[in-house]
Image: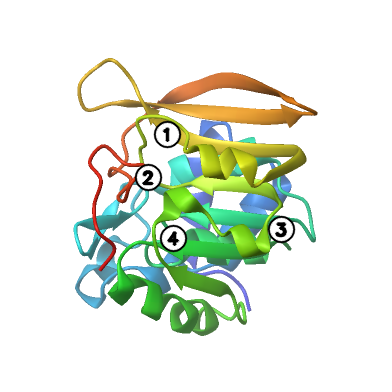
Amino acid sequence: MSAPPALKAMVRDHLRRRGVVSLRVLGAFLRVDRRHFVPSGRLADAYGDYPLPIGCGQTVSQPFMVALMLQALGVRRGMKVLEVGAGSGYVMALLKAMGARPFGVEFHRDLALGIPARVRAAGLGEVEVRCGDGGSGWPEEAPFERILISAACPRIPEPLLEQLGPGGILVAPVDSPYHGAQVLTRMTRHGEEVKTEALDGCVFVPLLGAYGREGARVV
């Protein structure tokens, strides 16, 4: 099925023209209709290049920022990828469209329970999702070849670094010294060494749980 014209325009104007060059990423955005992952009352805004509220104080992220993160991850077909802060499931669907094997952890139970149905409605089949403290990762499924943290953290949670496999890449927004902003950060494991790169400025909702800015009980 061909992508809707408005979705094609979003990919052309907000992703390709702004420097997203990965054909795998661009192809995934054309395949995954963002309308499946926004509230019914915000469908008219589904193709806008800005975050949208999805309940529980969370958002579905700006498409351009999601594309930058996925491009930085360098996902290849068949890779096992963990997303922390899965929200409405939009990024998990994009990962599935890229040929990855996504696993998602979402702090809020109501959001976590709705993800599989949304991904199925988007035509991407089944995904693995659990409700819990994302900073603890998913140790039973580790190691992961790629890890994406879709929420701002004061520092990269140590359990996630431990679950990153050899040659693995982790991308996350990390709190900067400047109030209200973060730095999109990429960490690449080379044996026992981990290389850290600052990629761009960004603004995300905070990571919840024991590894967030304030420890919080999973509900």
Q: Which residue is mark 2?
A: 151
Instruction: Pick whichever of labels 3 and 2 is earlier in the sequence.
Output: 3
| Marks 1 and 2 close (CB-CB < 8 Å) | yes
Task: State the quadrant of the C terminus.
Answer: bottom left
Q: Is residue 122 left or right of residue 74?
A: left
Task: State the quadrant of the N terminus.
Answer: bottom right
Q: CA distance from mark 4 to mark 3?
A: 15 Å
Q: CA distance from mark 4 to mark 1?
A: 14 Å
Indicate whether 134 appears above or below 1: above
Q: Which residue is mark 3?
A: 80
Question: Amino acid type of disc 3?
Answer: Lys
Q: Which residue is mark 4?
A: 86
Q: Residues within 10 Å of mark 1 (few under 14, many from 20)?
A: many
Q: Residues within 10 Å of mark 4 (few under 14, many from 20)?
A: many
Q: Is residue 165 left or right of residue 45?
A: right
Instruction: Pick whichever of labels 1 and 3 is earlier in the sequence.
Output: 3
Q: Identify which residue is drawn at 47% across, 33% down.
A: 156
Rendering quarter of residue 161: top right
Label 1: state its secondary structure.
strand
Q: Which mark is residue 173?
A: 1
Q: CA distance from mark 3 to mark 2?
A: 20 Å
Question: Amino acid type of disc 1?
Answer: Pro
